[in-house]
Amino acid sequence: MADDRLVLLGTKGGPAIRKGGPNPTASLLVMEGQPIVVDAALGVTRALVEAGMPLRELATIFLTHLHSDHVLELGGLIHTAWTSGLARQVAIYGPVGTRALWDGFRASLAFDIGIRVEDEGRPDLAQLVTVTEFGEGPVATLGGITVSALRVHHPPVTECYALRFDCDGWSVTFSSDTAYFEPLGPFAAGTDILVHEAMLLDGVDRIAKLVPNGARVKAHILASHTEAYDAARIAAAAQAGHLVLHHLLPADDPTLGEADFLREVRRAYDGPVTIPQDGHEIKRKDAP
Ligand SMILES: [Zn+2]
Ligand SMILES: [Zn+2]
């Protein structure tokens, strides 16, 4: 459809934010006219507004896994949509634990939610939201869109899923957080856009130096994330039409940027590549 698009709302990996830097991971996919939020990290609410999506139109949210750099603002997003006039059901899809995350948020805001229902006559927030917990396989059919999930390798998290969205003539696949994981190639086969996480090894050491628990952080990053070159190998194996890197590590290092990611990608994939900044939009290209 004419306004179908992908917007990379937040592009950095990891939960820390710094002055002038990007936000953690969240994306907006508009497919067949339906707005779908994929991951809901800090900053997702403001970024959706800036991307031109009225919060009243919030309808569908997918979570790839429950690391905070993917879910920290889930509750804040839905609550802000609610106070912005949300009048429709919101469906959350996420791995096991998603229901507890949402229930816990509502419990923490019980005072505010209760008083707004009583004092301002708003609909009961609990009744406006459904939660579906999914595992590997077919996840949902949303009108003309089918959604499927592949469990990826993101130790020690076991409930972590790549997501593939297909409609007539367009397909977008998100890797989620994962170490290099060969089954992503066939899972994403023929996809028009592969959104894959990516890191540069040169940047990992510098990230580790920024925090007191740097050695542990570095070990976690190396065991559970994908080098840009390997993301490109997945794109090549899938014959993806367009590779978009996100969850960038590093994302705000002035000495390592777009050219460095691109150089790694070009060792394995020669199709269109985007190394986005927050808010970058890619419109659906209809097949000729
Ligand atoms: Zn992450
Ligand atoms: Zn993660």
Image (cartoon, rainbow, N blue to C red):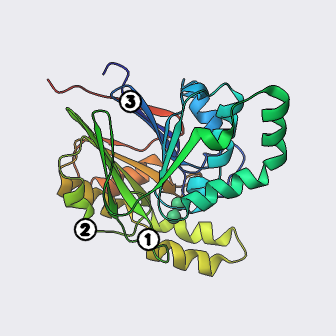
- The amino acid type, in three-letter code, at marker 3 is Arg
Q: Foreground residue, 288 or 136?
A: 136
Residue 262 position (above or below residue 144): below
**Which secondary structure lies at badge 3?**
strand
**Which secondary structure lies at badge 1?**
loop
- The amino acid type, in three-letter code, at marker 2 is Glu
Give the crowd class for mark 1: few <14, some 14-19, many >=20 residues within 10 Å.
Answer: many
Residue located beneath label 1 in the image: 154
Q: CA distance from mark 3 to mark 2?
A: 27 Å
Residue 41 position (above or below residue 2): below
Mark 1 CB lies closer than 8 A to ligand 2: yes
Q: Which mark is residue 182?
A: 2
Residue 184 position (above or below residue 172): below
Q: Foreground residue, 176 or 226?
A: 176
Residue located beneath label 3 in the image: 5
Q: Position of residue 155 (x, y in %)?
A: 46, 76
Residue 91 position (above or below residue 205): above
Residue occupying the point 60% across, 50% down: 41
Q: Residue furthest top?
A: 2
Q: Earlier in the sequence, mark 2 or mark 1?
A: 1
Give the crowd class for mark 3: few <14, some 14-19, many >=20 residues within 10 Å.
Answer: some
Q: Is residue 180 left or right of residue 189?
A: right
Q: Earlier in the sequence, mark 3 or mark 1?
A: 3
- The amino acid type, in three-letter code, at marker 1 is His
Number of callouts in the render?
Answer: 3
